[in-house]
Amino acid sequence: MDGEAREELMCRIAGEIILSQNPGKAMRKWRNLFELTQTEVAKQMGVSPSVISDYENDRRRSPGTLFIKRFVKALVAADELKGGNHVRKYAVFYRNLGSAVIDMDEFEDPISAGEIASVLEAEILAGEHLLNTPLYGYTVIDSIKAIKSLDAFDFLYLLGRNPMRVVVFTEVQRGRSPLVAARLYPVKPKMIVIHGPESRSEVDELAIELAEAEKICFALCRLKTSSEIAERLRSLKREVSR
């Protein structure tokens, strides 16, 4: 990864933590996404692990901007010592994907795939055993605009935005394309929801098979509009943030 992309990633993560209603929870979320222990991060920062624990569990006053910047640098440095896989993976999250994205946001606390399915009144087509998977955000995509305005790499990157999330594809006919793309790209979302088909019988069987093979929770949403889907996800975020 080039230095500019690395700096952009750090700025974005730091900004999310600083603007969060609960910075400690946001710190814990990103540390968990980077699969790092409090000890690993503390070592990079030159502080005791208890300091990280206190902030993440609200036992200390909200961390200041300088501490958060040091924390984010420590996440990146610790990950790069292990090969930098998470840094490369999450840099994808901040690509500009234009009008194809109807809505996108992050959750303060993880929400299970099962809760997402319930809120969207979605039928599970594959991956029922993955309903307890924690998700940290959502992206709602206009599939038609994505096909028209994004190149092949953008479409694949779209699937790989922070993989611990649900990606909802609207204006879908049979559901094959999102799953074929997911299979081609090594980083993929933990849950994919399609919107368009009226029933399971209208969904391409290959899409269901690919979801099972790739261990993706795959669901069909029958809400009337993409706006309703986005609003329900926004409402869920507000409820979790209270």
Image (cartoon, rainbow, N blue to C red):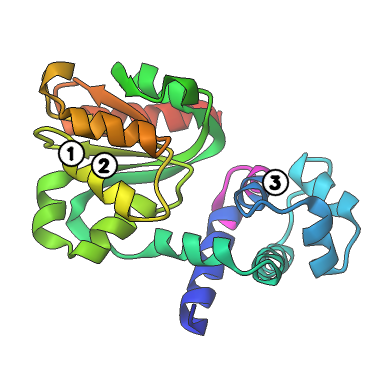
Residue most extreme to the bottom: 3
**Are the residues flagged by discs 1 and 2 in contact, CB closer than 8 Å?**
yes
> Can you give x and y, in whole percent of width and height, for residue 117 in the image?
37, 21
Q: Marks 1 and 2, Cα distance to the nearest angstrom?
A: 6 Å
Q: Residue at x 83, y 41 (%)?
A: 59
* Residue 65 circle label: none
Amino acid carrying label 1: it is Arg
Residue labelled with disc 1: 176
- In the rendered image of this protein, does residue 95 appear above or below residue 36? below
Amino acid carrying label 3: it is Gly
* Residue 179 circle label: 2
Q: Marks 3 and 2, Cα distance to the nearest angstrom?
A: 35 Å
Quadrant where the C terminus sits is: top right
Along the line of sight, the residue nearer the viewer: 146 or 101: 146
Question: Does the magenta segment cover residue 192?
Answer: no
The disc, 3 or 2, on the residue closer to the chain's N-terminal end is 3
Q: Residue at x 91, y 58 (%)?
A: 48
Question: Does the magenta segment cover residue 24?
Answer: yes
Amino acid carrying label 2: it is Leu
